[in-house]
Image (tube, rainbow, N blue to C red):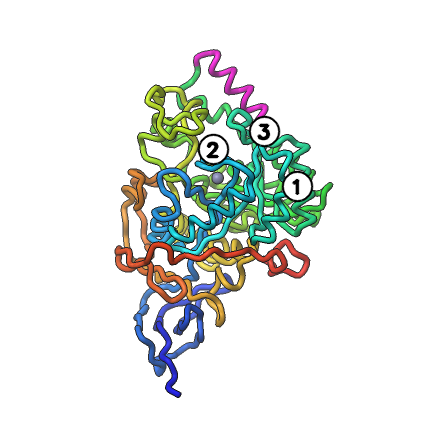
């Protein structure tokens, strides 16, 4: 019998893992990594790619995605692939503003089916529960865990958009998630205080960009984080606060972890690199919740990332046009564009940024190149940790024999000045950033998706990835981060 030639040999690159960097060759066949050695040059493959002088990273995972606005799973996954990402994890739930409605389990089943036809990349799903789901969430959580949806987000703010769960309901989700081996994720900001401050400023006619940060101050994130971490201790459930943005949150993370709590943390590239100056200059275009804060917050988050107190960087990216950001109302939950809204009232403007495509290059340029984090640490926070936390490791997030052949060839000498991203949007929130180090080739399961700035992947090739709660980092015998 003639042995079938493997599909791809990636030769001569510097392989980066969370533990270190070493020169090596990677052989991929039938979508999986077959072998990794110092020298596999005697092996023949259908295609050999010379990665000499380049880094080879596991494909990045964007574990905080909103592919529900202008970019659905087709264009969203294309944009991600251009940025060196090979797995996207989408938030899906009974949220009319996201184009969904109905019983959460059904909404998520439909999303998974649709994405199967659309996505260029492998994908997973986080469930999302909002106020309308308070009576059904106990039923839905175990159904979704059986489907492979093992993480559930809820909001402690945005009651006027129908997003906020009561503290009672939050304890119910956390209790049910703990019973089913799932992970509770939280948007931690004190919504009652945000509503109070917003009303107060609006009544005084203070509705320009300079009043946005004062309406969502740091202390409201810290208060909500402390409250929900206490719930987590009482209930005995693991917790993953999304998009931490305030320096005051870091000491809380340290304290709860020292007490032994299974607490996993996320921040986003914009909280590391953008400040309130953006909203002063750009108004609604830079509105995001939690808000962009001050330089001291960015510095504290970089330090926490280096010290291990932030585990994951994810994009929290939407996919908006300038028109949608300037005219879309925060309360116009269904219409993406409201012709009656002027964008002059910051409190009525839509939340969200376009950050996905340049997320990894921005953290490379501003983190690794500037000596704030190491390259192995970058691989931990974009690849290994999200895979371990969301039950996808070692299929995803690592270059190991038996793992999926998902990798990125990275050119550390390539420069790029950000203008806009791919997909249906017309701006990037990192516009004007000068980057050094860019992905050159993105591969999923041995097939090239993007190469030399060209899309060569195929719509509908992405597959749904069920998360496995038994291997996740919060499980008693799961993969530790
Ligand atoms: Zn989000």
Instruction: Give the crowd class for mark 2: few <14, some 14-19, many >=20 residues within 10 Å.
Output: some
Does 444 appear above or below 240? Answer: below
Instruction: Give the crowd class for mark 3: few <14, some 14-19, many >=20 residues within 10 Å.
Output: many
The earlier-in-sequence mark between 2 and 3 is: 2
Nearest the viewer among 463 and 63 is: 463
**Judging from the image, what secondary structure is the residue with disc 3 in?**
loop
Question: Mark 2 highlights which residue?
Answer: 96
**Magenta stretch: helix, strand or loop mostly:** helix
**Judging from the image, what secondary structure is the residue with disc 1 in?**
helix
Magenta-colored span: 191-205
Q: Identify the residue at horizontal 31%, vertical 41% (top origin).
A: 424
Q: Is residue 60 visible?
A: no
Nearest the viewer among 473 and 255 is: 473
Disc 2 and disc 3: Cα gap in Å? 22 Å
Q: Nearer the viewer, mark 2 or mark 3?
A: 2
Q: Position of residue 295 (x, y in %)?
A: 45, 36
Which quadrant of the figure contains the N terminus? bottom left
Q: Identify the residue at horizontal 41%, vertical 43% (top origin).
A: 67
Question: Mark 3 highlights which residue?
Answer: 190
Q: Is mark 2 within 8 Å of ligand 1?
A: no
Is 193 colored magenta in this rendering? Answer: yes
Does 399 appear above or below 105? Answer: below
Q: Position of residue 101 (x, y in %)?
A: 50, 36
Disc 1 and disc 3: Cα gap in Å? 24 Å
Q: In the rendered image, which quarter is residue 318 located in?
A: top left
Does 113 appear above or below 471? Answer: above
Question: Mark 1 highlights which residue?
Answer: 138
The earlier-in-sequence mark between 1 and 2 is: 2
**Judging from the image, what secondary structure is the residue with disc 2 in?**
helix
């Amino acid at each position: 019998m003639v042995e079938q030639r493997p599909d791809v040999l990636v030769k001569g690159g510097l392989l980066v893992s969370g533990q270190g960097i070493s020169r090596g060759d990677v052989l991929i066949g039938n979508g999986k990594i077959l072998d990794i050695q110092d020298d596999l040059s005697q092996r023949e493959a259908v295609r050999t790619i010379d990665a000499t002088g380049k880094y080879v990273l596991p494909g990045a995972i964007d574990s905080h995605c909103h592919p529900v606005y202008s970019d659905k799973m087709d264009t969203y996954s294309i944009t991600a692939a251009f940025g060196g990402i090979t797995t996207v994890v989408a938030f899906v739930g009974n949220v009319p503003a996201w184009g969904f409605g109905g019983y959460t389990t059904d909404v998520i089943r439909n999303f998974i089916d649709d994405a199967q036809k659309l996505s260029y990349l492998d994908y997973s799903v986080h469930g999302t529960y909002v106020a309308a789901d308070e009576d059904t969430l106990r039923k839905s959580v175990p159904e979704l865990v059986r489907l492979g949806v093992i993480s559930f987000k809820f909001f402690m703010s945005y009651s006027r958009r129908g997003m906020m769960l009561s503290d009672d309901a939050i304890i119910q989700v956390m209790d049910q998630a703990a019973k089913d081996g799932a992970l509770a994720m939280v948007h931690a900001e004190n919504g009652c205080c945000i509503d109070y401050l917003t009303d107060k400023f609006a009544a005084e006619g203070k509705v320009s960009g300079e009043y946005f940060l004062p309406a969502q101050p740091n202390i409201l994130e810290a208060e909500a984080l402390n409250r929900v971490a206490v719930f987590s201790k009482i209930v005995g459930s693991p917790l993953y606060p999304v998009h931490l943005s305030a320096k005051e949150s870091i000491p809380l993370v340290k304290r709860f972890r020292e007490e032994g709590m299974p607490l996993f943390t996320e921040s986003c590239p914009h909280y590391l690199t953008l400040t309130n100056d953006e909203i002063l200059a750009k108004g609604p275009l830079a509105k995001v919740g939690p808000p962009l804060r001050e330089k001291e917050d960015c510095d504290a988050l970089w330090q926490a990332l280096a010290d291990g107190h932030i585990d994951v960087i994810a994009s929290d990216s939407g996919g908006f046009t300038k028109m949608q950001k300037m005219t879309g109302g925060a309360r116009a939950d269904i219409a993406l564009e409201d012709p009656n809204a002027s964008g002059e009232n910051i409190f009525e403007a839509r939340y969200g940024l376009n950050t996905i495509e340049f997320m990894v290059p921005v953290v490379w340029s501003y983190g690794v190149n500037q000596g704030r984090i190491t390259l192995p640490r970058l691989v931990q926070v974009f690849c290994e940790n999200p895979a371990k936390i969301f039950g996808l490791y070692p299929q995803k997030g690592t270059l190991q024999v038996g793992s999926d052949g998902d990798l990125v060839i990275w050119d550390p000498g390539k420069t790029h000045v950000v203008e806009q991203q791919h997909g249906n949007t017309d701006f990037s929130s990192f516009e004007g950033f000068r980057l050094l180090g860019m992905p050159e080739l993105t591969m999923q399961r041995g097939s090239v998706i993007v190469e030399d700035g060209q899309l060569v992947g195929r719509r509908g090739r992405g597959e749904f990835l069920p998360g496995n709660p038994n291997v996740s980092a919060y499980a008693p015998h799961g993969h530790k981060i």
